[in-house]
Image (cartoon, rainbow, N blue to C red):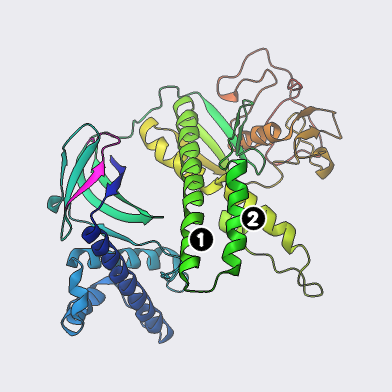
Amino acid sequence: MLSGRRYRLELTADQAVLCETFGDICRSVWNTALEQRREYRRRGAWMNYVPQAAELAEAKREFPWLTDAPSHVLQQTLRDLDRACREHGTFRVRWRSKAHWSPSFRFPAGNLIAVERIGRKWGRAKLPKLGWVLFRWSRALGGDVRSATVTRQGRHWYVSFLVEDGRSTPDRHTMPETAVGVDRGVKVAATTSTGDFHDRPYITRGEAKRLRRLQQQLARCKRDSKRRRTVLAKINAITGRVRNRRADFCAQTAHTLTTGNAVVVLENLRTRSMTARATGTVERPGRGVKAKTGLNRAILDKGWHTLELALRNAARVTGTRVVLVNPAYTSQTCHACGHVDPKNRESQAAFECTACGHRDHADVNAAKNILNAAGHAVSGRGDLGIARSMKRQPTATRAGRSPHAVCVAGVPVL
């Protein structure tokens, strides 16, 4: 199994300059190759990796500055672009802006990379054209190195090793009869069908105040000024900590859910479409824009997509299946009787069915419906339908049953 190991680098001044140079060259190659692909598509032709790699070799003779970066690093950039264009489409792949893209490049040849531990807290890696670079030994490498990716986050540089750890995904989970539904929300990051709430603040009150003040200062800075670069560095320091806390929370939550459940059911949410910028209506272009902006910010802050990626990554180790279901009406459907009504949800947290009077936490009710939509019903006694108790109550029948509902009445009121 391939796994990632990320460490913080301690580069010398010369090595930092080289890394910046490698990143700039890779960005230039990416943008030039992307423009070439788009121009070919406009003419009705097709361009792929093989001819672009050949043209890159010719371009090195005309532009000597391309030789400052290792050849296989530039070739890997073209391979990444080729994969992105095949998966997303040539005109959907984004440019790499100097202002908004952090330098990043990959060494794909693991046989050219050597890693040594030189102390309790320090290790070093030998990378092509960079030589030996120091990094903080925060965890064991645990396998043979296949590739290394160097990135900059804020003012720090990091190296991520792709290693073969020798493990494989188990054919069967240790608890094969367990399943859980997960509802992702803007108030609570993740709520399970068992009634567990997973959430944490990613930013402190003091950091939020400083961030707002820095954003106001940034709005008054002149472009390409030294003061603007200073303010941006301070902003990146705060947002970097927030990003790390979010990633840590998602990884821990994913480990908890996959370790204890053979099936994890999520709503099939298209986060990118859901967080698209609002434009209002034709008659009133600004209508609802402020509210939609706040909702987008809340969705992105909770890290819905990050949690899904973390679950899929953790599921490789435990053998858990991650199932996506249709999210329609999961928050408006009564888990007890299947009645669908927008009025069932009184508020963000309160749920009371207008047909049978069933009361529950709104997110827990939605998580149970999500689990039911995957075919794993929650019985009236609260246990999973996979290993259902024989002393269950009869199934309720109503004309307004949701297509998701495969449940019975009598869920205890929380």
Residue visible at 51% across and 51% down?
Answer: 239
Q: Name which residue lies at 57% across and 43% down.
A: 203
| Residue 338 x %, y % | 76, 35
Residue 64 image offset from top left, x and y in percent: 18, 79
Q: Residue furthest top?
A: 391
233 left or right, relative to 196 = left
Q: Quadrant of residue 378?
A: top right
Relative to 253, does residue 96 appear above or below in the rendering?
A: below
Q: Is residue 135 magenta?
A: yes
Locate the N terminus and report the quarter of the image it occupies.
Answer: top left
Question: Which callout, 2 or 1, points to the residue nearer the camera?
Answer: 1
Neighbourhood count class around disc 1 (C-alpha, 10 Å): few under 14, some 14–19, many 20 upward: some
With 67 as the anchor, is 321 left or right in this view? right
Which residue is disc 2 drawn over? 296
Q: Give SS at disc 1.
A: helix
- Would you say residue 213 sits in the magenta stretch? no
Look at 49% across and 23% down and name the residue there.
177
**Span highlighted in magenta in the image:** 132-142
The numbered mark, 2 or 1, whose residue comes first in the sequence reads: 1
Instruction: Looking at the picture, tell me which residue is in the foreground, 262 or 53.
Output: 53
Residue under pointer 1: 231
Q: Secondary structure at mark 2?
A: helix
Quadrant housing residue 296: bottom right
